[in-house]
Image (cartoon, grey):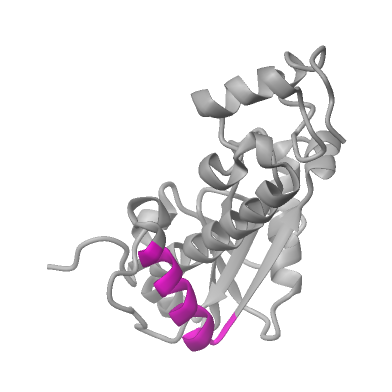
Amino acid sequence: MEVGPSHFFEEAARVCGFRRIAGLDEAGRGPLAGPVVAAVVILPRRYRPQGLDDSKVLTVSQRQSLYDRIIQQALDWAIGQSSEQEIDSLNILEATRLAGQRALAGLRQSPDCLLTDALHLPRVSLPQRPIIKGDALSLSIAAASILAKVFRDNLMNGYHERFPEYQFHIHKGYPTPSHLQRLQQFGPCAAHRHSFKPVQACTSFPHHP
């Protein structure tokens, strides 16, 4: 019996006549710092590398290994992101949608159907199917979740080099107790989302550019 994400939704789309089926997912809606990143992937039919699953249930090394295989073997893939400033200006939902639009714009092949993890992109004219917990159910969305997660984690590792006092390489900007403690100690930096309430609560502390 097949466990984890399957080809069910991709094959259902094929029954409806679609052929270039893309999966899209994002990483970074919940953090207090860093961009939100979206990835889109068009996989070969019935493609399933060993271990492919929702990025949240995989280890760092498993995600990296799958990332390398997916970008080599996918028919097409692309990454889009929205900055902290865009998140503050637009709100996190609209910034996530913008990142998804940018990812789609980066594809070399034009998909004719889009599967998403419960996200609708109103400015995208493609037929879309938002799927609740799609990253755990659809192989295309699961593959996109891995690309988005690995790409964003690597960005946050780079943020650690710029702002080492916050230890972004450990918590990736999520509101862990350690991150909140450092945010209170040092105040927000340029990497933080200043519209988020836990960050606003620390604006009276020293500000790091």
Could you tell me which residue is drawn at 68 percent across and 81 percent down?
Answer: 110
Q: Main secondary structure of the magenta part?
A: helix
Residue 55 in percent (x, y) is at 41, 57
The answer to whether residue 198 is visible is no
Residue 36 in percent (x, y) is at 67, 49
In the foreground, 115 or 64: 64
Count of numbered badges drawn on the protein: 0
Could you tell me which residue is drawn at 56 percent across and 35 percent down?
Answer: 174
In the foreground, 53 or 131: 53
Q: Quadrant of the N terminus?
A: bottom left
In this rendering, the answer to whether 102 lies above or below 121 is below
**What is the quadrant of residue 184 in the picture?**
top right
In this rendering, the answer to whether 52 lies above or below 20 is above
Q: Quadrant of the C terminus?
A: top right
Answer whether residue 164 is magenta in the image.
no
The answer to whether residue 121 is visible is yes
Q: Relative to 61, is 23 on the left or the right?
A: right
Q: Which residues are magenta?
A: 61-76
Residue 105 in percent (x, y) is at 76, 72
